Amino acid sequence: MLFIKDKNKIKNNNKFYPMKRTKKDEPFKDNNMSAPQWFVPVKAGDAKVPAYYPTDDMIQEQKKKLRTRKGAKITALDKPAWNLEKLRKSIVPGAILIIVAGKYAGKKVVFLKQCIKSGALIVTGPFKINGVPLMRINQRYVIATSQKVDVSKVDTTGVDVKFFKKIAIKKAAFGKTVEEDFAKKQYEAKKALIVEKQKQVDESIVAEIKKVPYLKEYMASYFT
């Protein structure tokens, strides 16, 4: 909005000249106008007013176009975490790692893949050779060796955050034995799934370890 001192100076070659309003100046009164005369709208230089505004149907069609996607639907578990930890260059799928802390300190494991949600390493002994099951471990607690095993044939589908989630069985209160029985059934089903997956992974990894001479004995020995 611009302040015009005189009504006669409103139009001058299609241009508006702003002037400061003082206390003595009074607004020009006109019965046909609701606002004072010194409020004069200013037109934008090169801005173009759209000829029409989109209707509701057009807006909905545009939203539908944006929602379309190609390929399979990505779930929350398939999306990698935004702060996913980067692995060291020596830690690659199939590399043999040495655990330096924890319950299995001193044992050697085979690195399978990285958990895309927590960034932890998913490793296995395999369990048939040194008793280390499928487990998660942070990369700061392992030392990478130069020895590697081919794990391209190992099926690790389903080994994610849900696979390692534990199901706790709590004692049900009086009259709630049905919930306790349901929790026990879930626990047994989860335990059977882990055992079956462990056998499947061990079968393919042990076959690759046997191809390298003395590697089976090396995996079974402790690191001192």
Image: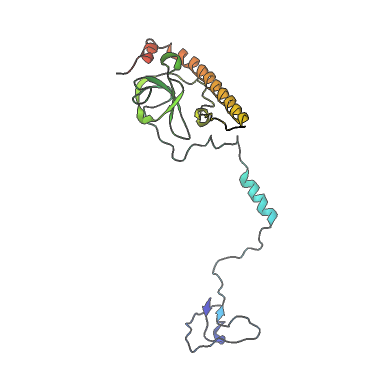
Looking at the image, residue 139 sits to the left or right of residue 185; the answer is left
**Where residue 9 sits: x, y (%)?**
54, 85
Residue 214 spot, x, y in % from top left = 37, 10
Q: Position of residue 196 (x, y in %)?
A: 54, 18
Question: As drawn, which residue projects farthest toward the bottom?
Answer: 24
Q: Nearer the viewer, residue 38 or 86?
A: 86
Residue 140 higher or lower than 67, as above or below: above
The image quadrant of residue 224 is top left
* Residue 15 coordinates in the image, percent (x, y): 54, 78
| Total numbered circles | 0
Image quarter of residue 216: top left
Left or right relative to 185: residue 22:
left
Rendered residue at 51%/88% (across/down): 25
Q: Nearer the viewer, residue 28 or 169?
A: 169
Question: Visible in this render: residue 113?
Answer: yes
Q: Residue furthest left?
A: 224
Residue 139's place in the image compared with 197, above or below, is: below
Image quarter of residue 106: top left
Query: Above or below — where is 220 with respect to 71?
Result: above
Of all residues, the one furthest to the front in this rendering is: 174
Residue with the most extreme right position: 57
Report if residue 13 is visible in the image: no
Q: Nearer the viewer, residue 157 or 59?
A: 157
- Above or below, 59 against 109 in this view is below
Q: How is the image coloured?
A: rainbow
- Residue ID at (54%, 30%): 171
Q: Relative to 133, is 193 on the left or the right?
A: right
